Amino acid sequence: MKNKSLWLDGYVNANYTRLQEDITCDVLIIGGGITGLSILYNLKDTNLNIVLVESDLIGHATTGHTTGKINYLQEHVYSDIQNKYGFNTAKLYYDSQIEAIEHLINIIKKEHIACDLEQVTSFVYTNKDEEIEKLKYESTLLKRFGAPVKEDEKNHPFINSKYALSVSNTYVFHPLKYLNALKQICLKKGKPIYEKTPIIDIQKNNNEYLCFTQENQIRTKKIILACHYPYFLFPYFLPLRTSIEKSYIAVSPALNKKETFINCSKPIVSLRYYQNNLIYLTNTSQSCDNLNEEENYQKLVKQMQNLNLDVTYLWKNDDLLTVDKIPYIGYIKKNDKSILMATGYNTWGISNSSLAGLVISDLIQGKEINMKI
Ligand SMILES: Cc1cc2nc3c(=O)[nH]c(=O)nc-3n(C[C@H](O)[C@H](O)[C@H](O)COP(=O)(O)OP(=O)(O)OC[C@H]3O[C@@H](n4cnc5c(N)ncnc54)[C@H](O)[C@@H]3O)c2cc1C
């Protein structure tokens, strides 16, 4: 059994460049996960002098530990958003996910990216009687949006479902293969990417920023924080209204069923297949819950054994949850167009980073967009 992400196993990145001189640019993207790369890709054909810096290697943080579902069926997110902000906002979020997924799939097709993309049927299910009504309501809402949603009461391997919703226009992929391809495309377009280059401090100096690495500085007019959570700005950065969700993931050999599953209440169980492997996520907990990682790993291994599954990979991952299920994408301050961020994807960061790529590249180019979600 390997204690590492399946996506990172065997991933060789000998071909990277570290920043070794002081530079000046128009826009600096901090963070080389799927958010940073999606933004850089969308700006690759502009004349902007744009640079991306990554403290480690491309994709080695949250994105390299994800389950890699490209999915708009996100538990009962649409009912939750409707309850807080009304039907139109829930519909806007749905439209944003559909557009972002289409954009991502178009990039993969247009650039011929070999990232093991597969179309799958995705299910959100419950094994609790008291949750069935809530899922039925989510189904009604999705139908009003025009989604091809079906209801399902069958049994499925490895889960214990009483009632489920499914859609078949969703996908899974290999996130590292996708990111690596975006990296190569952006480099070929002359957009520099510096890895092993952490930003340790940012200072504002009149109309520009000075961003410091250990040895060098980057002078820039605009900054995009694509670094998941800007811990390195603490205590200067106001804490976002977020919580952190920790999950544990195991992989086991299993016949590929071209399906994905997620239940709709804690503890989350989420499944997908990659080739003939089952990727099984559970023990999801808020950071205030059981922090004993060893115990949580053991619990997951036991769960897998109970399902007669051998574990070949085991890893953990964290994501940021926002209080209202809406991600943070855009300007940090209303009247300051020089600093932007994208994070808080509520564990649906593949579609939402693609959305961030669209929104932030439009904002950087001065295009008008409807920011009122
Ligand atoms: C267990 C789990 C499963 C998930 N599964 C799915 C899924 O199936 N589908 C889905 O849609 N979403 C999923 N998500 C969510 C999704 O994976 C994340 O939201 C997404 O990967 C976040 O991408 P990112 O680029 O914003 O962050 P990251 O991938 O973390 O990238 C940020 C980068 O910034 C770099 N960085 C940080 N600080 C600095 C600095 N000071 N200087 C330079 N660089 C810096 C980091 O090294 C990192 O590489 C999952 C999340 C979890 C936790």
Image: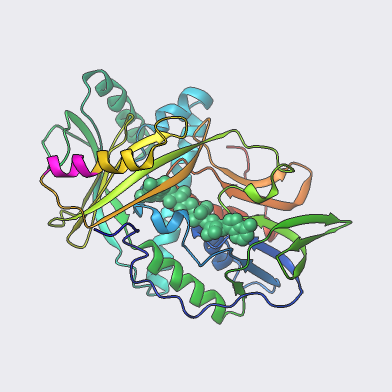
Q: Quadrant of residue 171?
A: bottom left
Residue 326 x, y percent position in the rendering: 52, 37
Magenta span: chief secondary structure: helix
Whether 179 is drawn above or below 87: the answer is below
Residue 253 lies left or right of residue 183; in this view the side is: left
Q: Is residue 303 magenta?
A: yes
Residue 337 x, y percent position in the rendering: 75, 51
> Is any atom of residue 357 visible in this view?
no
Residue 139 lies left or right of residue 220; in this view the side is: left
> Seen from this angle, which residue lies furthest right?
206
According to the image, what is the colour scheme of the structure?
rainbow
Q: Of 73 and 341, which appears nearest the observer?
A: 341
Identify the residue at horizontal 28%, vertical 38% (top origin): 269
Quadrant location, the N terminus: bottom left
Residue 44 x, y percent position in the rendering: 59, 72
Q: Which residues are magenta?
A: 301-307
Residue 92 lies left or right of residue 264; in this view the side is: right
Q: Of 325 and 17, which appears nearest the observer?
A: 17
Q: Of 110 and 187, which appears nearest the observer?
A: 187
Residue 140 x, y percent position in the rendering: 31, 28
> Is any atom of residue 237 visible in this view?
yes
Identify the residue at horizontal 44%, vertical 73% (top origin): 181
Q: Is residue 96 magenta?
A: no
